[in-house]
Image (tube, helix red, strand yellow):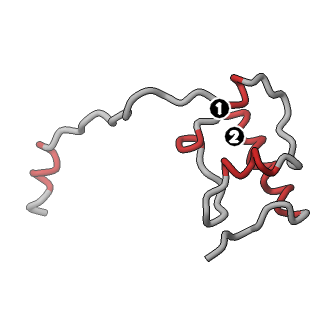
Amino acid sequence: MAGKGNERSRKRLPPLTGGRRKSCFFCKSKVDEIDYKNVNELRRYVSERGKIRSRRISGACRRHQRQVAVAVKRAREIALLPYVGDR
């Protein structure tokens, strides 16, 4: 209970933005649909371990990030992309 006094006096700092926001690659190249058969393009959005990278890391907009996730899942289902990365 003694520690609560310290928490109240501590001020919350604003989040660090870290610079400029990345622009969406698919919006720049005016892509409407992301094709799951284009594996070379999808590899950019998958980590070495096989995880789908987040919007914050990949720089994709909300709409295209959702399409990337669906395309990666479809490509994994038909064995174009691995579920897990190489160890």
Residue type at mark 2?
Gln
Q: Position of residue 78 (x, y in %)?
A: 91, 63
Q: Which mark is residue 65?
A: 2
Residue lying at the far bottom of the rendered structure? 87
Residue type at mark 1?
Cys
Give the class, few, some or many, for how many residues have Cα within 10 Å of label 1's Cα (few <14, many ≥20): some
At x 86% / y 48%, what residue is drawn? Answer: 36
At x 78% / y 53%, what residue is drawn? Answer: 72
At x 15% / y 43%, what residue is drawn? Answer: 10
Residue 14 appears left or right of 23: left
Identify the secondary structure beneath mark 1.
loop
At x 61% / y 58%, what residue is drawn? Answer: 47
Q: Which mark is residue 61?
A: 1
Foreground: 2 or 65? 65
State whether residue 43 is above or below residue 27. below
Q: Position of residue 8 (x, y in %)?
A: 15, 45
